[in-house]
Image (cartoon, grey):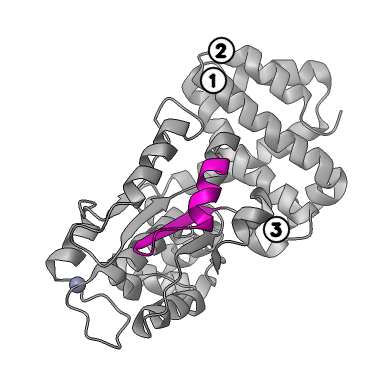
């Protein structure tokens, strides 16, 4: 429910008012770092729109009517969420075509037909071209909710067709209070999680189940940062250690990708939306040392490595190549 959304009161309030005054747009783009709540917000917004228990002039979902419960359980026929197939890195064009066909149908139960497309940057060019047409001339009863880490990752033609709903990291005090109040978390742990999560509630909530992940993550990130000072030969050795198998290799990439995105964002002059706010000093130092082009190149190298691992390339070889493109040599 939108009323339970942690942080970003301005954006949440703006969306709630749009429903209350019945001035909802046909396309929204929700942006923000990983695990900030982009998908949660999209679903909460969809729920409030479909809610049957909401009085006229109100913007908040009742949370108890059949429509609200169906959206919450992911089985409302007029709220569809697209997902990248498990064995792929991108959306398939066939998925986009299906969605385009589906969005032109009349809503069966709800007010509108709502399509949620998370991580819209994972759309390929043909997918983008097809979606552009729908964004340009959407059916009157349709609504598209896109999410993306940053508007920098999308074409201006996409951005200009959407209302922007930006989400920024939640202040540590606000996030800690929510963890204590709603998840029964001890105040001290809540404060630590609020900071280490970089203000991303999703990360903090996940970490409630794995408190040891905190320390482990910090240690590995520092080890990885130190690799920029390593020689070519040392990097080859490190590849064997970091990527003895596919799982370890993927874990390192999962950890490293948001870190280097932060370095790139900081180097591009957008440090306020970084994920690792607790490591701001290290990230700023790296951003200054390597600059936007090198950081961006390495983010791309990480994405290529992730794709190669998915295609079952040898993890050690993938990492040998990856580490040679790590800045510092
Ligand atoms: Zn309801």
Ligand 1, by image quadrant, is bottom left
Q: In the image shown, does 210 or 128 lie closer to the viewer? A: 128
For disc 2, the neighbor class at 10 Å (few under 14, some 14 to 19, many from 20) is some
Q: In the image shown, does 203 or 28 lie closer to the viewer? A: 28
Residue 266 at x, y = what percent?
A: 75, 55
Write the start and end of the magenta stretch as one range. Answer: 128-148
Inspect this view and state whether residue 208 appears. yes
Quarter of the image containing the N terminus?
bottom left
The correct choice, above or below, for 226 with respect to 187 in the image is above
Magenta run includes residue 157: no
| CA distance separating discs 2 and 3 | 34 Å
Which disc number belongs to residue 30?
none
The correct choice, above or below, for 225 with respect to 314 in the image is below
Whether the residues at callouts 2 and 1 have beta carbons within 8 Å, the answer is: yes
Q: Which residue is mark 2?
A: 313
Q: Quadrant of residue 87?
A: top left
Q: Residue furthest bottom?
A: 57
Which numbered disc, 3 or 1, marks the residue that appears first in the sequence? 3
Q: Which residue is mark 1?
A: 309
* Residue located at (69% from left, 34% from top): 300
Q: Which residue is mark 3?
A: 280
């Amino acid at each position: 429910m939108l009323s339970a959304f942690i942080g970003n009161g301005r954006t949440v309030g703006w969306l709630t008012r749009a429903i209350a005054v019945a001035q909802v747009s046909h396309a929204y783009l929700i942006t923000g770092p990983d695990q900030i709540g982009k998908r949660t917000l999209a679903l909460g917004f969809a729920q409030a729109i479909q809610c049957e228990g909401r009085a006229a002039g109100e913007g908040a979902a009742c949370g108890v009517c059949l429509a609200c419960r169906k959206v919450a359980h992911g089985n409302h026929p007029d709220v569809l969420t697209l997902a990248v197939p498990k064995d792929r890195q991108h959306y398939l064009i066939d998925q986009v075509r299906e969605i385009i066909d589906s969005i032109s149908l009349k809503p069966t139960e709800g007010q509108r037909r709502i399509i949620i497309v998370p991580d819209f940057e994972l759309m390929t060019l043909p997918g983008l071209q097809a979606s552009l047409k729908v964004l340009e001339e959407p059916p009157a009863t349709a609504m598209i909710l896109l999410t993306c880490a940053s508007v920098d990752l999308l074409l201006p033609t996409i951005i200009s067709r959407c209302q922007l709903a930006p989400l920024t990291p939640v202040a540590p005090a606000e996030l800690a209070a929510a963890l204590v109040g709603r998840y029964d978390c001890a105040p001290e742990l809540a404060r630590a999680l609020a900071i280490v999560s970089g203000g991303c509630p999703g990360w903090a909530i996940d970490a409630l189940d794995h408190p040891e992940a905190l320390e482990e993550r910090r240690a590995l990130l520092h080890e990885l940062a130190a690799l920029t000072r390593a020689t070519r030969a040392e990097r080859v050795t490190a590849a064997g250690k970091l990527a003895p198998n596919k799982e370890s290799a993927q874990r390192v990439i999962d950890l490293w990708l948001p870190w280097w995105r932060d370095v790139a964002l900081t180097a591009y002059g957008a440090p306020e939306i970084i994920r690792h706010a607790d490591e701001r000093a290290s990230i700023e130092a790296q951003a200054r040392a390597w600059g936007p082009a090198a950081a961006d190149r390495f983010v791309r190298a990480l994405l290529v490595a992730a794709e190669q691992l998915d295609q079952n390339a040898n993890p050690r070889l993938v990492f040998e190549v990856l580490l040679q493109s790590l800045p510092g040599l």
